[in-house]
Image (cartoon, rainbow, N blue to C red):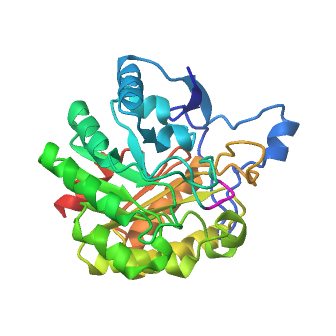
Amino acid sequence: MPVVYDPKPEPPAPRSSAAGGYHPGSLTPEQLKAQGRRLPPWIRGRIASGGGYSRIRSLVEDKRLNTVCEEAQCPNLGECWSRGTATFMILGDTCTRSCGFCAVKTGRPGDLDLDEPRRVAESVRAMGLKHTVVTSVNRDELKDGGAAIFAETIELVRDMSPGCRVEVLTPDFLGDTEALDIVFSAKPEIFNHNLETVPRLYSTVRPQAVYARSLQVLERAKDAGLKTKTGIMVGLGESPDEVRELMEDLAAIECDIFTIGQYLQPTQRHLPIVRFVHPDEFVEFKHTGEEMGLGHVEAGPMVRSSYHAEEQSEGVMAG
């Protein structure tokens, strides 16, 4: 069984925050090494197991599907699969981009699997989901970036599982408005496109992406009448002020859901962790974002874009 990080350890005692600076409880990898520790006490490993985990594993293998849970080495795989939830990854398992944080493999993708939307929809029905998340690799070599496959997947999930909310986590489609409109027209309940990091770090974290373009994708989705969502990682070298400025940008376009979690280096080939952000700082980010007017802010060391996605959407959809 794969070892993942435990999302529910007891956090350390609260510590006060230094205004405008790094939280006193934040730790760098060097500090941890000096203390003889690899991870701070609020991030721990556990074994993924249980009936729910086994059921999802069997279903994914039987339907020949990809999940971002596995491909991106999500630290919450054990918890989510044990609860019977998974995030489906369409358009194959090979990405045309080479982001410095992502464990999904990069290269030349194979042919499109045109039967994939049906198999995803059948899996959603078999799992009895009330909320499903569908994401993808980047397919920049395709004329529409895979937008038509996204739309078909949304439509088939609705046909086979009436009442199931569909959340999509899409690429930026290189800013192509026609491709975006294809996805918008399928009317997913939640449209998610992750900013991933602050603008200053894009050249190293997302070298083939553009912050302003990603922001425009979210704004276009909002203008199309969709509920919008985005997320970032911290611990890559950003400052708290840069995170607050990013949240101001999101508040200006009335983003509905914002997620923020700790970056964890998937392999030695990926970007190093600059610091482990203290849980209290995540609490501060949550309060600040909600005070700015963001509809819902999910913040914590183990938070990922699709973590507790169903619960995140409840209040936003009801509002």
Visible in this render: residue 248? no
- Tell me residue 76's x, y (percent): 49, 37
Identify the image quadrant of residue 53: top left
In the image, the segment drawn in magenta is 97-101
Numbered label tally: 0
Q: Residue at x 21, y 42 (%)?
A: 130
Image quarter for residue 67? top left
Check residue 99 for magenta coloring: yes
Residue most toward the right?
34
Point 53% across, 43% down: residue: 302
Most common SS among magenta residues: loop
* Quadrant assignment for the C terminus: bottom left
The one nearer the camera, 252 or 216, is 216
Q: Residue at x 36, y 51 (%)?
A: 134
Looking at the image, residue 148 sits to the left or right of residue 78; the answer is: left
Q: In the drawing, does residue 315 fall left or right of residue 41?
A: left
Q: Is residue 32 above or below residue 228?
A: above
- Whether residue 109 is visible to the viewer of this picture, yes or no, is yes
The N terminus is located in which quarter?
A: top right
Q: Nearer the viewer, residue 95 or 129?
A: 95
Residue 265 in magenta stretch: no
